[in-house]
Amino acid sequence: MSETITAWLEKHLPFDLACLPPESYLVGGAVRDILLERKRDYLDLDFIIPEKAVEVARQLAKNHRAGFVVLDRERNIARVVFPEGTFDFAQQEGKTLEADLYRRDFTINAIAYCLERGKLYDPTGGLNDLQQQVIRMISIDNLQDDPLRLLRAYRQAAQLNFSIETTTGLTLKQLAPELIRVAAERVKSELNYLLNTPIRGSYWLAIAWQDNILAGWLPSATAPKVALLTEIDQTAQLVYSKFKINISQSIALAKLTLLLSCDPEKAESELTNLKAPRSEIRLITNVIKYLNILKNNQDKLTLKEKYFLFLDIKDAFVVLALLCLSLKLFKLEIMSLLEHYFNPEDPLAHPKPLITGDDLLKHLEIKPSPLIGKLLTEIQIAYLEGKIATVEEALVFAREIL
């Protein structure tokens, strides 16, 4: 195992390990992932330095002209940023390495690798749990110290395809109310990982909901909604198999939308509470608005309704489509609309004006007013219906309306 880590570091590190002082250790998820042979496109490594961790990081950044930032001056933690990834250097907490490792969340994340001696240190039994493919807590106190670790257990189970050890699972349920104490930005980040992990993310998100882990953050989530998470995954696979377009971001947003209130204002409040970006809040609330409209309209959509749908929902259409398909709303029509949407030249989904407002002002000799917008809309609909095809025909059509 040690030889595996040594070879991996020599191949991937953008700096020489000799730059680091003796008794430096690679720790945390990096050791775990190297042992599991998990591919990392962007490196994110943590090192424990016996002393002067900030100074060591600063000198390393200076020598390699890399980025440098102090993350926690009090605890002596700094980050060096290379194009290949980020490297965090922290001063050892506690008098010994073992004491430091016993402060971590789960055993599989408490394995250290001594860079100088090429030796693994595993005081908590993490190597055995890696073989058994289980998430096991080190102590209940460690989870209480940082309740975000509760949600992280489900996230890592999803990403690694591991199970959660029985006693650990019971403890997560017991401590579930503690997650509300965590900063919203940190909760949203962990939630995003679960939302973006196909299939297993939905499974473990459902387990987390059953364990009341997310009750304080997603109060509108219900059993029927949670049950539809896997439906969205399956629908997304069908959409991808037909159109061969990456829609991963839309999948995550569709799942999040599903777990929120059906009332756009309440959903906005829930997203604001989670410190979601304003752009994400606008997108999701718009999707909810149109989802409610479609739920209450069982008639076939007219061409004009389709035009306005694309015009208003814009890039959120795939999110809306995934939800509609999962809820069995307008299934055939939605698949047809997806064909329009994924064709960048399609005039219905991506309209290109036949004429402009200035053209109308000039040729019809009328004054600026809201009428111009209405005329342009009617012209576009007539163009889509095949009633007109040229600028001249559009102007004649506009005169007839006037």
Image (tube, helix red, strand yellow):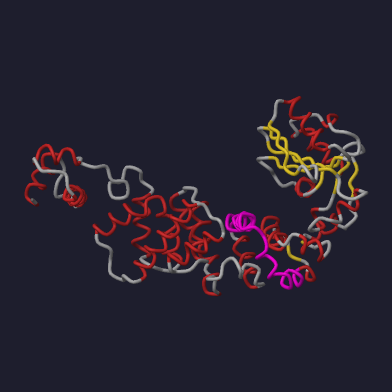
Which picture quadrant has residue 396? Answer: top left
The kind of secondary structure the magenta stretch mainly shows is: helix
Q: Quadrant of residue 196?
A: bottom right
Q: Which residues are magenta?
A: 169-198
Magenta-span inclusion, residue 193:
yes
Residue lying at 79% horizontally and 28% vertically, measured from the top left: 59
Q: Residue furthest front?
A: 74
Residue at image point 59% right, 60% down: 199
Where residue 399 sits: x, y (%)?
7, 47
- Give whichever of 359, 319 is nearer the camera: 359
Residue visible at 8% across and 50% down in the picture: 402
Residue, x 85% and y 29% (percent of image)? 18
Q: Which quarter of the figure has residue 180?
A: bottom right
Asked if residue 34 lies in the magenta stretch, the reply is no
Q: How many marks?
A: 0
Q: Tell me residue 237's x, y (percent).
A: 51, 57
Q: In the shown orientation, is residue 116 left or right of residue 165?
A: right
Of 234 and 18, the residue lying toward us: 18
Does 105 sit left or right of 304 as displayed?
right
